[in-house]
C-alpha cells in the first residue's frame, strides 16, 4: 500500500493522503504506471485496499474496486510481468492460514456463483482439506478440481493419486504423504458426489491466500497463489530427502544431529570460569 500512498501524494501534491478518498480514475492511473514500470503483480495492492475499505465499514458493493473495468485493469497490470518466485508457506504462515479460513468474513473466501447455485456445504472445512492435501502432494492447482474418489491409489506403496489431464504426458501419478492421505479421507466423506473437492476450489484458495497475505503481512515480493502450495510440498519433500541422506551418512537421527552434534560452536555450553 506504500507505493499507492506515495503515488496519490505525488499526484495530489500533498502529504498523508487518505486512501479512503481514492477515486477510481486515480487507481486506474496508478495501475497504468505500475504496469509501465514492470513492478509485478498488482493483485496484492488491490487486496490490501479492499481490506482497508472493509475495515472502515465500506461494503464491496459500495466500492469501485469490484467494478468490471477495475478488475480487468488489475489483471492487465499483473499480466506479463517479470518472473517472481512463488512463496513457500512456513509452519507459522500455515497456522495463520488455517485460522484465517475459519474466521475470515465470507466475502474474503472469494466470490463464486458455483457454490451458491450448487449449494456447496462445508466450504471452509473443504478448503482447509484441499490446502492440506496440496501441501502433501505435488499436484497442480488446475488438477485439484478434477480429482475423483477412484483416483486415490492407496494400495500402492507409497500411496499415489491419479492425475487427470497431466501437464506432462505420462506423469499421471503423484506421491501422497500420510498427511495428504488423511486430508483426502476426510474430504472424501464430505464430498457431495464423485468429485473430492468443489469445482471452484482454486478460486477460493486464491482468495484466502491473497487476503491472508495482506492480513498477516507475509513476505513482500513473493507471489502467494495456489501454486505456492505445490512449491511448499516439493520444498518439504526435498528437505526430507536431504535429512534422510544425512541420517544414512552419519548413522545418527535428525533429533540427535540437530540437538547435539549439529549445534553451532557459539551456542555450545561453556564451562564457567569458577570451575576452571
Image: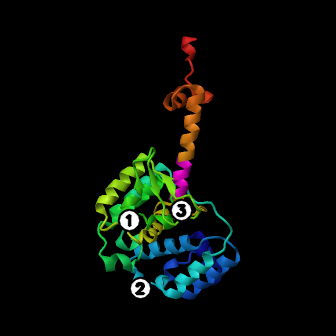
Residue 175 position, x and y percent, is 49, 50
Secondary structure found at label 3? helix
Q: Which quarter of the figure is the C terminus placed in?
A: top right
Q: CA distance from mark 1 to mark 2?
A: 32 Å
The question of residue 118 being in magenta is answered with no
Q: Which residue is mark 2?
A: 62
In the image, residue 26 lies at what x, y percent? Answer: 58, 85
Q: Which mark is residue 227?
A: 3
SS at mark 1?
loop
Callout 2: few (<14), some (14-19), or many (20+) C-alpha neighbours within 10 Å?
few
Q: Residue at x 70, y 78 (%)?
A: 36
Describe residue 69's horizontal placement relative to residue 146 as left or right. Answer: right
x then y, percent, for residue 229: 50, 58
Task: Give, as a single range, the part of the protein colored magenta.
Answer: 229-236
Name which of mark 1 and mark 3 comes first in the sequence.
1
Is disc 2 placed on a helix, strand or loop?
helix
The reply to whether dot 1 and dot 3 touch (C-beta < 8 Å) is no
Q: Looking at the image, which residue is at 53% across and 41% down?
A: 240
Q: Residues within 10 Å of mark 3 (few under 14, many from 20)?
A: many
62 sits to left or right of 41: left
The picture places residue 275, in percent across and down from the top left corner, at 54, 12
Amino acid at each position: 500500500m506504500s507505493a499507492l500512498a506515495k503515488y496519490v501524494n505525488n499526484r495530489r501534491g500533498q502529504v498523508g493522503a487518505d486512501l479512503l478518498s481514492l477515486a477510481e480514475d486515480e487507481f486506474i492511473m496508478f495501475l497504468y504506471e505500475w504496469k509501465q514500470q514492470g513492478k509485478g503483480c498488482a493483485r496484492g495492492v488491490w487486496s490490501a485496499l479492499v481490506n482497508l475499505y472493509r475495515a472502515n465499514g465500506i461494503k464491496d458493493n459500495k466500492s469501485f474496486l469490484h467494478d468490471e473495468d477495475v478488475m480487468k485493469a488489475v489483471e492487465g497490470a499483473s499480466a506479463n510481468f517479470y518472473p517472481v518466485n512463488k512463496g513457500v508457506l512456513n509452519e507459522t504462515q500455515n497456522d495463520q492460514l488455517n485460522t484465517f479460513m475459519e474466521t475470515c468474513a465470507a466475502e474474503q473466501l472469494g466470490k463464486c456463483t458455483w457454490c451458491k447455485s450448487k449449494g456447496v456445504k462445508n466450504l471452509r472445512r473443504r478448503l482447509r482439506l484441499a490446502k492440506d492435501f496440496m501441501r502433501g502432494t505435488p499436484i497442480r492447482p488446475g488438477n485439484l478440481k478434477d480429482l475423483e474418489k477412484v483416483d486415490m491409489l492407496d494400495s500402492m506403496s507409497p500411496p499415489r493419486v491419479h492425475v487427470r489431464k497431466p501437464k506432462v504426458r505420462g506423469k499421471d501419478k503423484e506421491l501422497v504423504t500420510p498427511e495428504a492421505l488423511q486430508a483426502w479421507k476426510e474430504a472424501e466423506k464430505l464430498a457431495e458426489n464423485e468429485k473430492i473437492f468443489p469445482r471452484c476450489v482454486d478460486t477460493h484458495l486464491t482468495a484466502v491466500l491473497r487476503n491472508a497475505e495482506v492480513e498477516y503481512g507475509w513476505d513482500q515480493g513473493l507471489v502467494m497463489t495456489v501454486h505456492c502450495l505445490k512449491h511448499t510440498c516439493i520444498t518439504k519433500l526435498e528437505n526430507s530427502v536431504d535429512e534422510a541422506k544425512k541420517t544414512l551418512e552419519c548413522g545418527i537421527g535428525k533429533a540427535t544431529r540437530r540437538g547435539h552434534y549439529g549445534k553451532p560452536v557459539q551456542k555450545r555450553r561453556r564451562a564457567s570460569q569458577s570451575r576452571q
